[in-house]
Structures are given as structure tokens and as C-alpha cells.
Amino acid sequence: MQEFDFDLQSIQAARELARRGKVAANQIAHFSEEQIDRILRNMVEAAEANAEVLAQMAVEETGFGVVCDKVYKNHMASGLLYEQIRDKKTIGIIEVDEKKQTIVLAEPVGLLMGIVPSTNPTSTVLYKSMIAIKARNAIVFSPHPAAAKCTAMAIKLMNDAAVEAGAPENVIQGISLSTMAATNELMHSPEVAMIIATGGPGMVKAAYSSGKPALGVGAGNSPAYIERTADVPAAVRRIMASKTFDNGTICASEQSVICETCNRDAVVAEFTRQGAYFLSEDECRKVCNLLFRNGHAMSPKFVGRSAQVIADAAGISIPAGTRVLIGEQHGVGDAWPLSYEKLTSVLAFYTVENWEEACDLSIALLQNGIGHTMSIHTESKDIVRKFSIKPASRILINTGGTQGGTGLTTGLDIALTLGCGTWGGSSISENVGPEHLINIKRIANGLIEPDELVAHDELFAKYHPELARKHGACAAPAPAAAEPHPVSGITYSAGCGCCAPSASSCATEAERKSDVIDADELKRMVEELVNAFKGV
């Protein structure tokens, strides 16, 4: 029997995943709100029950992060996420505008492809599975090879829980023969309707280049500005809590701290008191040589590592209990490596004279993570207004970047895929949720007869009086009407219209008036139409 090469086997397996996923997508597209909610609740129970096991597996397999923090990430991506999305309208009629006589309906996208990063492997699976199912989509995942086992476990747990609660078989799947060829095959599969890309810039670019609609995110390089009016101990506490959470693996975490000359000593003292170690120039150079390769690309060996692990590898002696390493920088760019994104326990440190310099520096830093996130610690509303124009999709005030950007300590939506807008090459600037995984359909009732439009357009008559008069003279005679009236005479059929009255039948004026469709009637019609499509 002929043995096929591994990459060919992975391509065939990817095709099978897509075909099975499409079948599941077609089936779940007809589920009700009650069915979807029951499935989600069962998925939450499974995720919460296995949150610690998944966290341990992720740390053991990748070496990134902290188990207890990954447990909370898993909780965030399941229990907390469900509480936020449970009442969101993603099925059927989601809006009715009685004045405009329109109805908005939500339809599923179909089969989604989810790309999973090694930094947040299990929580990303939980999160993307939850928002996919909430929008009545199936999803197939492409795991990062460095986190294949824990990702596969999370996928199995979510699919088993969903199917147990009534979801179609194979509604949540993942690549088991992990190759770039398999990922590429899924990206270009005709069955896949949309890609949710969370990962490195190369993978996100590939998703956008696939020809599919894609929700991708750029790199983060968030500066945190401690302005002169800030409560310094509180600001430092928030930054430390954010940067040490899972050893800085969330892309919204702070990458640089900016303070002013007037509060520099207080900021340095407070960071030191709270467990930060300020590197000497020589020590900083040693750390940078470890962290980066090929310029400013981060070495996977030191992603999500503790300050102690990094210091030991660099041959640096640091005090016991050190939580973060800080290196002072005097510019932005290749000569200052810490000015780039560092998904680990290391921060850059800058001192400026005033908010104007902080403004310019923030913009320069954001060019290497443009559109993502920025944090400001201040008591000045004027400073908030001044910094609100920065090229970042999330401007966070007096909170940590990790927890604030992902919606844990702010009013933002809870999410692990954070859009960067057109600044960062993203198709979206929001925190991604189920509302981004639906197609919006609008049904609009006629409000005015087309041949009466110009006659009732006072603005057109104001700007084009001659044309308005000419149009009125040329228009076909119509029944006198003081006001535009809704189009009437509509008959409703769930099929091809073969049951409609014949053209020869003549309705009276009273019958025509009674046939005007109001919002309630239009809503009922839509519900009947939807049921007809479902075969109910």
C-alpha cells in the first residue's frame, strides 16, 4: 500500500475537516435561541471544569506563561464571556424600526476557520468556539504546532460538550496533522466562509491574502504614560499587575513606560518597591541579545518567561522576588530594541519633560504596534482628551493594558482577538465578538411610491426648482395625495407568489388601506418566511 507524504496526508485531512464542518454549519444554522443557549451553557460547564487541566497542559507544552493566570484566561473565555454574550441578539430578528418600516435579521456566516496562537492556545479555542456557536456557525481550528496537544484537548472538550447538548457532530474541529500546507488548504477551502486570525503577523497576513473575509489583528506595542497628575503607586500597581499576568503574553500588555522628569524619581522608586529591577546599560544589552533575533523579532525561547528565567539566561544577578525587568531607552527603532513588542516580563522605560514630548514618543512607539492599545495614568481630563487622538483602537485610562484591553477591568467587550483598525491593517477596530460573525439582512417596506418621490422632495425643489417643476409636468397622473403614503396592495406568499390574487382582481380603496403593512405585520411576515425556508 502506498504511503503518502505527511504534508499530503495533512492536506487531505484538512479537506475532510472542511467538508464535515460545512455539513455541521448548514445544520446549526437553523437552531433556535433556546437550543444555542443550551449548547453554550454546556460548553461553559465543560470549560470551567477543565480550566486548570488545560492551563497546566498549555504551560507544560509551550513553556509560556503562568498556570494560575491561564486558568483565569480560560474562565474569562468561557464563564465571563457567556455572561456578556448570553443576551446579545444574533439569531433571527434583531431589530425593528417602526418609523422606517425596516426589520434587521441575523444570519450565520457558515463555517469559520480559527487560527490559534501558542501564547493563548486553550483560551483562544474556548473563546472562538463560544462566539462561533453564539452566532450559529461551525468552526475548524488551525493550532500552533508548539501548542498542538493542549489545543486539541480544548477543541475536543468544546465539541463534545456542544454535541452532548444537541449541536451537530463536528461543529468544532481542529487540524490534527499540523502543517503549513494543511493551514493553507483550510484558508483556501471553498467550504470556509471566514477566517478569525489571531497569531503572528505572517499568519495574519496570509489570512488576509487568502481571498476570504478575515478578522485579523496586528501586533501590540502599548505605551503606558504616567502623567504628572497620576497617582504613582496606583499606576505602578496596575502596570505591574498587567505585565506580570501570564508573564506578559497578552498583546495588550504594556511594552513601554513613559514618565515625566518631575515624577521620574517617584516612579522609579515605586517600580523598585513593587518588584521591578532596572537593568544597567550592559545588562540591558545582554537581555536584548537574548530576546530578539533577526532585528526585533522576538525569540520564542523567551516569550512568556519570568524575569528570573530571563535574568539567569543572561547571566544577570537580580534580587529575589523580582517580577519585571526594566531597561531605559532613549529612542525608538532598531538602535533601541526594547522599543518593540516584548510578550514577556520586560519593559522599556522613557523619561520626557512634558505631555507634548510624551505625545510624540507615544506616536513613535505606536508605529511598531499601530492601532492596538495605549494606556494613560492621569487625573487630568484635559490630558485624556489630548491623547484620545492617538492611533490606537483602545485608549485605556487608569487601568492595566492586559485586563483593560481584553474587557476584564473596563466596559469593553471581553475578547482575545483585538482589532487594530486600518492603522494596523485590520478589517475591524473593535474587540471581536459574535456580532462580527453574522450576516446582516435588512427587510425594508416601501414608504412612498417611486413616481411620487420628486413631488414630495422639498429639498430637491429648493436646490433644483426648474427640474422639480419640469418633473412634475412630465410625471404620469397619479391620485391626489397630500402626503406620501406607504406602498400598499402587497400580498404575501412564502413561496413563488403563485397564490397571489390575479392581476385582474380590483381592490377597493378601503381594502388597499387595510393592506398597508405596519411593523407588527411585517415582523409576522418575516417570521413566516423564515419558517418557510426552514420547512417548519
Image (spheres, rainbow, N blue to C red):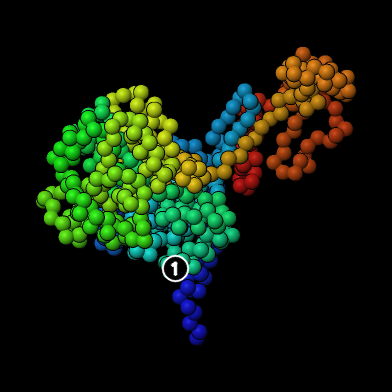
Residue nearer the viewer, 243 or 351:
351
The residue at 82%/21% (across/down) is 467
Position of the C terminus, as image quadrant, is: top right
Task: Classify mark 1: helix, strand or loop.
Answer: loop
Is 226 situated left or right of 159 in this image? left
Q: Is residue 481 left or right of residue 210?
A: right
The count of marks equals 1
Q: Which residue is mark 1?
A: 179
Which quadrant of the figure has residue 312?
bottom left
Residue 111 vertical placement versus 515 (above, below): below
- View extreme (top): residue: 482
Which percent across, then down, holds residue 125?
39, 54
421 versus 314 height, above or below = above
Residue reaching furthest to the bottom: 1
Q: Kindly identify the residue that appears in the image at 35 percent across and 26 percent down.
A: 383
The spot of residue 212 in percent (x, y) is 56, 54
Occupied quadrant, residue 101: top right
Other residues around mark 1 within 10 Å, as few (<14) / some (14–19) / many (≥20): many
Please state the horizontal and vertical placement of residue 311, each as a whole percent of the image. 18, 56
Image point (40%, 31%), residue name? 388
Left/right placement of residue 98 relative to residue 335 reads right
- Residue toward you, 32 or 125: 125
| Quarter of the rendering containing residue 306 | bottom left
What residue is at 38 percent from the left and 64 percent from the top?
Answer: 145
Q: Is residue 281 visible?
A: yes
Q: Amino acid at mark 1?
A: Thr
Residue 110 appearing in the image = no
